[in-house]
Image (cartoon, helix red, strand yellow):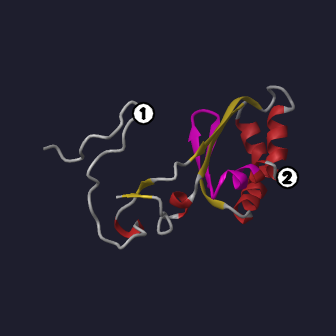
């Protein structure tokens, strides 16, 4: 069911701003050094107003990334300005390629509409199929979900 009401969704579904990023460290020592700043940073992030959820991922051999969700873009940007996040970013970038050889950050904003069903529905709780798919950028209307 198409919806703009995500109040029954889990924290990730209630967020309207998402961060994804990754850092390619120079080696295991640089990765271990990150722990000194990482845990205080995560504690701070979880306490901040607007934090919804995050997870960490790993790519062999030395890349660690984060996906984080926030209530809105302001909450996400306030976290980016926080002391522990700033300290980590300065440590990664201020010393040339001594600690990290690559990295990226992407920021995403949720559209106001989306989809929900089952226990995450905020409407009357009945489940129903959508009659049409959401249109692509080249379409004025999406095709029917069920073929005639």
Q: Which mark is residue 137?
A: 1
Q: State the residue in front, 55 or 130.
A: 130
Q: Nearer the viewer, residue 6 or 22?
A: 6
Question: Magenta span covers which residues?
Answer: 55-77
- What quarter of the picture does the C terminus occupy? top left
- At which x and y percent is residue 52? 61, 61
Q: Position of residue 111 (x, y in %)?
A: 52, 48
Q: Which comes sooner in the sequence, label 1 or label 2?
A: 2
Residue at coordinates 16% horizontally, 43% vertically from top-left? 147
Report if the CB atoms under discs 1 and 2 are less than 8 Å apart.
no
Whole-percent x, y for residue 23 in the image: 68, 36
Question: Which is nearer the eye, 86 or 35?
Answer: 86
Residue depicted at x 72% and y 64%: 49
Q: Quick check: 130 above or below 137? A: below
Name the residue: 26% across, 40% down. 143
What residue would you read off at disc 2? Answer: 83
- Marker disc for residue 34: none
* Location of residue 97 (image quadrant): top right
């Amino acid at each position: 069911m198409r919806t703009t009401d995500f109040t029954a969704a889990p924290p990730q579904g209630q967020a309207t701003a998402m961060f994804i990023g990754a850092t390619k460290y120079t080696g295991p020592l640089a990765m271990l050094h990150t722990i000194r700043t990482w845990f205080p940073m995560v504690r701070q992030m979880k306490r901040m107003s607007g934090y919804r959820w995050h997870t960490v991922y790993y790519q062999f051999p030395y890349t660690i990334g984060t996906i984080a969700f926030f209530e809105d873009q302001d909450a996400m940007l306030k976290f980016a300005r926080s002391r522990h996040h700033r300290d980590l970013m300065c440590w990664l970038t201020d010393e040339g390629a001594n600690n990290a050889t690559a990295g990226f950050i992407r920021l995403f904003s949720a559209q106001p509409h989306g989809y929900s069903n089952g226990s995450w529905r905020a409407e009357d709780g009945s489940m129903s199929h959508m009659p049409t798919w959401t249109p692509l950028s080249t379409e004025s209307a999406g095709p029917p979900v069920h073929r005639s």
